[in-house]
Image (cartoon, rainbow, N blue to C red):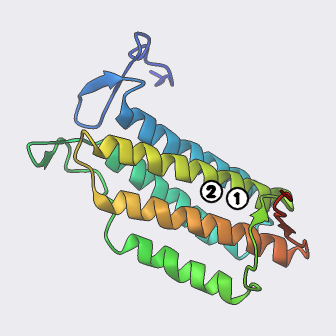
Amino acid sequence: MTTRIYTRSGDEGKTGLFGGQRVSKDSPRVEAYGTVDEANAFIGIVRSLLAEDDPLQERLAQVQSDLFVVGADLATPEVEGKTLSYHIPRVREGDPTRLEQWIDEAEDELEPMKTFILPSGVPAAAYLHLGRTVCRRAERRVVTLAHTDTISPHIRVYLNRLSDLLFVWARLVNARAGVRETPWIAPKA
């Protein structure tokens, strides 16, 4: 028997979390991990635009894997201090440190910023900028969820650092492509 992608279990507007709990598809928890999934898809677009041998490919793939962990962590609620599923990977305290190292390495290759820049450039850079904004939205959704549910504080830190990394990588991709950044010029009063 073939397993089908559709289950019909969500037709009434509910979805299952890890551990079996059913919640509305517009719950803050589903909004949070759904937005993380959206950020992951934008990173997939970036990977499709970069050459297979581009040095960022491996790191982007690692970020995509990390985002699956973030999503799984968010989809596994705690009840009375215990997770409903013990087989789910969790975001660890050291995960953002790896992103900070990658930020530092990329910034070593870039000219220092002197002004705000407009999100633009080659398609991969533009999608990194878009992924950054989705990552920021995911971070906001996680903050909203944390008002009512217990979540790992490492998730917020990871998403915050990831949005910084995606910004720096957008600059790096443009720099490596020889594309100059477009500075934002404030309107005259």
What residue appears at the point 29 percent right and 46 percent down from the top-left corner?
Answer: 146
Label 2 secondary element: helix
Residue 163, x across and y down, in percent: 56, 61
Residue 59, x across and y down, in percent: 59, 70
Q: Mark 2 sits on what residue?
A: 132
What residue appears at the point 17 percent right and 41 percent down from the top-left corner?
Answer: 84
Residue 53 shows up from this direction = no
What residue appears at the point 70 percent right and 58 percent down from the top-left corner?
Answer: 128
Measure the C-alpha gap from mark 1 to mark 2. Answer: 6 Å
Mark 2: give few (<14), some (14-19) or many (20+) Cα within 10 Å: many
- Position of residue 34 relative to residue 65, above or below, is above
Amino acid type shown at disc 1: Leu
Residue 78 shows up from this direction = yes
- The foreground one among 121 and 102 is 121
- Position of residue 41 relative to residue 115, above or below, is above
- The foreground one among 69 and 96 is 96
Q: Residue furthest bottom?
A: 108
Label 1 secondary element: helix
Mark 1: give few (<14), some (14-19) or many (20+) Cα within 10 Å: many
Quadrant placement of the N terminus: top left
Residue 128: image tag: 1
Residue 26, x across and y down, in percent: 42, 25
Amino acid type shown at disc 2: Arg
Q: Are marks 1 and 2 in contact (CB under 8 Å)?
A: yes
The reply, left or right, for residue 6 in relation to residue 129 is left
Hey, which quadrant is residue 60 in on the image? bottom right
Residue 109, x across and y down, in percent: 73, 87
What residue appears at the point 89 percent right and 73 percent down from the top-left corner?
Answer: 180
In this figure, what is the number of numbered marks?
2
Quadrant placement of the C terminus: bottom right
